[in-house]
Image: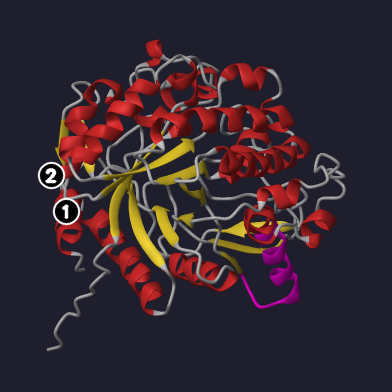
Amino acid sequence: MSTPTTLTFPEKFLWGAATAAFQIEGGADSRGPSIWDTFCRTPGKVHAGDTGDVAVDHHRLWRQDVRLMAELHLNSYRFSVSWPRVLAGGIGFYDALVDELLAFGIEPCLTLYHWDLPQYLEDAGGWAERETAYAFAQYAHDVGAVLADRVRLWCTLNEPWCSAFLGYASGVHAPGRTSPADALRAAHHLNLAHGLAARALPSAAHVGIALNPSAVRPLTASPADRDARRRIDALANRVFTGPLLHGAYPDDLLTDTATVTDWSFVHEGDESLIQQPLDFLGVNYYSPAVVSAATAGDGPRRDGHATTVHSPWPAAETVAFHQPPGERTDMDWSIDPTGLYDLLMRFSKEAPGLPLMVTENGAAYPADLHDPLRIAYLEAHLTAVHRALSDGAPVEGYFLWSLLDNFEWSYGYSKRFGIVHVDYATQIRTPRSSAHWYARLARTGRL
């Protein structure tokens, strides 16, 4: 009988969990309205008409939640700041949260934007307008002035692909618009916002960005399917990594989308401004994408953060998406940890020496407290992370999604990603089996 292999992670590896402000905080009466407040109140947009008004009441229960993190042996916590709360004078909430985390030996990893754009900015055109990027830079400056003396790790944006393409092309996320041209404008202005914010933050801040790159695979080795993969790789990945890592949008992206936009919204100097020095690159990963050239009757579609009605893929009419065989999560996302390995190795080669973080990875499963399927999912993906480390990828941390059950965007409260169960009626938190499993791993660094 063979002896199971123990995988040991680096001594200073960050073991964390991640959340987002709108998904957990509640406290809607102490912040201004965001695009997600408006979207939740638009009939038919969110499951059961759910809202983030109360969520899991973290705005009130945050001290309890920090103690829970400490009991789970987390040494880092990735959270987002609510831009509408800061505008309403609520920066003190995050000031106190950071102090509490540090008191328990938990390193804060702060995300400035996790999709909750102030509604007044959307009323003025949202991310399709250049001025939103400048407003974001001012917001970054203001938050940095208060917190950068104690917060080392800063993510400017979380998953700008979702903000741009699910928010402005498919319309299944806030603000619910369906304009492919505006989606590409939004993608650029999000990139610009990152560059401006990176310059606006104090020099002590270690600045990164959390992308959700797609591990795109062709269905077959045919030239047509390989070209489909190229097109989606440009729209899913290189639309961001081009300017972020290399200071330019890829030529094939500009050619592919020429019938949608002329890219005149990219001003001279923008791409070099976007390419600010990065201290780390965050990788959010859940499931790979399998694509082929479309045949008659196929339309562009994607199994992703929400079920799409309109296509989130501008100028991708010739591409079809396929659900791989095998096990799936409650989101109907296929389970394939090799996609995470592939992405970590890709970026370690594309940007040699740039530290990497897995800033989100996890799975939705039923509400049961005993969740062996989630444990198996996490174990398989962390094995992939260890393999990437062994093969030279400079991965410095892993943030499990998510600490708590929460508001899952257009799915409302119908999907549960938390390693900690939340009774939404009472707000009682109960760690699942996966939480105890992850706590042992965080304490020992051994898988």
**N-terminal-most mark, 1 or 2:** 2
Residue 401 drawn at (x, y percent) = 35, 47
Q: Are marks 1 and 2 in contact (CB under 8 Å)?
A: yes
Q: Quadrant of residue 249?
A: bottom right
Farthest-out residue, top: 29
Q: Which residue is mark 1?
A: 439
Residue 29 drawn at (x, y percent) = 39, 10
* Count of marks overlaid on the render: 2
Q: Quadrant of residue 428?
A: top left
Please report the residue visible at 53 percent of the width from the left and 45 percent of the height from the top: 159
Please report the residue visible at 12 percent of the width from the left and 89 percent of the height from the top: 1
Residue 73 drawn at (x, y percent) = 17, 50
User: Residue 71's mark?
Assistant: 2
Quarter the C terminus occupies: bottom left
Farthest-out residue, bottom: 1
Please report the residue visible at 72 percent of the width from the left and 52 percent of the height from the top: 272
User: Residue 291's mark?
Assistant: none
**The magenta stretch spans residue 334:** no
Magenta residues, start to end: 219-234
Magenta: main secondary structure equals: helix
Asked if one can make out residue 129 in the rendered structure from this viewpoint, the answer is no
Q: Quadrant of residue 406?
A: top left
Horizontal side, residue 429 vs residue 155: left or right: left
